[in-house]
Image (cartoon, rainbow, N blue to C red):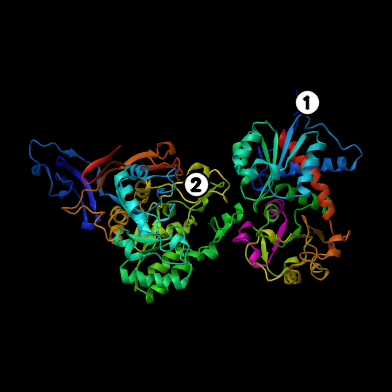
Amino acid sequence: MKKKYFLNANIIDPHNSLNEVGGLIINEEGKVEAIGKKVNENNIPSREKYINLKGKHIFPGLVDMRVFVGEPGYEYKENFRTLSNAALSGGVTSVVTMPNTNPIIDNVSMVDFLKRRGRDKSKINIFPTASLTKNLEGTNMTEFGLLQKKGIIGFTDGSKTIQNTRLMSRIMNSAYDLNALIIQHAEDSDLAEKGMMNDGIISTKLGLQGIPEVAEKILIERDLSLLEEYKCRYHIAQISSAKSVSIIEEKKNFLKFTCGVSINNLSLNENDIGDFRTFLKLSPPLRTEDDRVALVEGIKNETIDVIVSDHKPEDEEQKRLTFAKAATGSSGIETLLSLSLELFHNGSIKLDTLIKTLTCNPAKILKINKGNLTQGNNADFCIVDINKPWVVKKENLLSKSKNTSIENKKLQGKVTNTFVNGEELYKI
Amino acid sequence: MATKSSKAVKISQKHLLGIQDLSIGDVNYILTEAKQFILLNRSKNKKLDTLRGKTQINLFFEPSTRTQSSFELAGKRLGADVMSMNIVNSAIKKGETLIDTAMTLNAMHPDLIVIRHQDSGACNLLSQKVNCTVINAGDGRREHPTQALLDALTIIEKKGKIQGLKIAICGDILHSRVARSNIYLLTMLGAEVNIIAPTNLMPKDLEKFGINKFSDMKKGLESCDIVMMLRLQNERMNTSFLASNREYYEYYGLTPDKLNCAKEDALIMHPGPMNRGIEIDTNLADDINKSVIQEQVELGVAVRMACLKIFCE
């Protein structure tokens, strides 16, 4: 590989507290050789060509902690190849995949397959999770230790909650012994049973069964009470309400844990469901505008650690149904960064705070050396024109499934190039 | 020139999906038309040719006696060709989706589809996929517009007006599309609406629709002109909402004792089918001086004729 030189870019690398105009040199092995304002024309051999990125930004490649891939079992929704193309076009270079495939990732024999497919078919870094319980049944825990040795990054039952309190305490104990990361989908399944959207005036009007915000609150309070007794690496996958933000803010004063939020919950609210738009049937559900504002505030004051795409590809047939029967979730990995930038453009969140929640914060939780541009590291990064206007059109999406929650939305900011290990794998 | 379409009034919507979509002008137009059909339905020759040559398909995904037969009769009396799909024997049982069923029926060029479905919003989905007019005969717990219209017509026939009346709606509000449609319609027409239900059967944020909420039935019935009872929808209840039917009857069943809280000339309404002895005392239900339940059924045909005619134009 030839050396690559980029100059005059606005470089933001929160891991290294870097926010300055400067250059980036990638060496022959695809690693960061030098970065920052010290890199200028004088560092470049006179016969070498450089790329002038004046006005553009360089961010570390995004780390998306919540991605559903259809492989194995649901390849018609998304496979590793399509996922990786979609991710690259959104500047995402590392993803954490969810275990609810078919078969479910709950034993070591599945992990080899997954690692091999991920390596052969995708160009991005795949970090698979395994399920917390066998067959996602919520009764017997999986082999955290053995699975971790095979390369599993963390454990979660995906869209399901560990409802049994005794089991959860035991999971936490095992996770402590084995230093495993536990990711909980926090929603009391009894209270949320058959719910389809936020419980409130809109659900009453549409005649849809609601999911009360207390369903999330109760589970978070329970888990955090357990965590006081049973310490472990604990992460709440996604929160959706103002009440959850304030509990987490309070508990973080004396407890160590982390939490995430979906970009959907930061950008949309229950009113967007309008006339039964099934593409906005999400889990956790979109809640009120007050909740959305509280979540944005939670990112701003760093109560919430990460923003995820909650990328859940579903084929159109599963969405062209009545709201009750339609599948839950939306495709979002390609629009994660652009939609996040909306929060910067409208003045809600500072750019480096935003990038932090998308890069080094998730990497730190996962304990992986990604999401930063430290000298000597693999050069995973994206070049972004943060002002470029564009419109989300489902026919232009690279994901196999087109169930975007923001069809026709006007966005500002687009990834123009994405590099993994110094190699340019996406170009607009 | 102005022969057939000399009417100044026109309906604002293509489909009748819910009261929420209608303007007060639309409602008055439908109710005025319906009044003309009441007399027709009581006369010897009940047949008109208003909808001759039109095809009406009734698509009922949920069991129904009065609504389905009422729509069928309404279509036939207006001269339409009415086909009622039997869902039990249809391709839906073979796994066909609602949209595919809609596309199939659409290819047969109907002028009207009347749909009842267990899922809220099913009629909205259907209306996006077919060319003809869609009439909602009840979708999940969202709306049942023709029921609300026939209730309003019954009240107007009996009380001469709706404006200024105090109307109680009592029972399983949570699962009730009739309650929702009636709340929209009766508040639109100027009534004061009291909603009475055990808190477990009261939907979230209902007070934001401009009604008064009560869990004490006697308080809610105070000086009411109309007492509208709803059926306890046991089939929609997946977990324990109530301890027992007998306790429910004790606190929320309409009995002569509780009815005394309402005005002396208060009328009893019920959209049917009734659970006698659970939400209503059986003698009260049959009391011809107080109960207008049979009139509701009668006027239902007139209201549906008006809707079919207006929305088919």
Give how far across and how far down residue A264 sits, in percent: 43, 52
* Residue extending farthest top: B1
Q: Amino acid at mark 1?
A: Thr
The chain holding disc 2 is A
Q: Marks 1 and 2, how far apart in space?
A: 47 Å
Circle 1 sits in a helix, a strand or a loop, which is it? loop
Residue where numbered disc 2 is placed? A279
Q: Quadrant of residue B24?
A: top right
Residue where numbered disc 1 is placed? B3
Could one spot residue A106 in this view of the protein?
yes
* Residue extending farthest bottom: A229
Could one spot residue B9 in this view of the protein?
no
Q: Quadrant of residue A360?
A: bottom left
Q: Is residue B232 left or right of residue A78?
A: right
- Taking the magenta stretch, the answer to whether it contains residue B185 is yes
Give how far across and how far down residue B231 sits, in percent: 74, 59
Crowding near the residue tagged with mark 2, few <14, some 14–19, many ≥20 C-alpha atoms within 10 Å: many
Q: Is residue B27 left or right of residue A29?
A: right
The chain holding disc 1 is B
Q: How many marks?
A: 2
Magenta span of residues: B182-209
Give how far across and how far down residue A290 sits, in percent: 47, 59
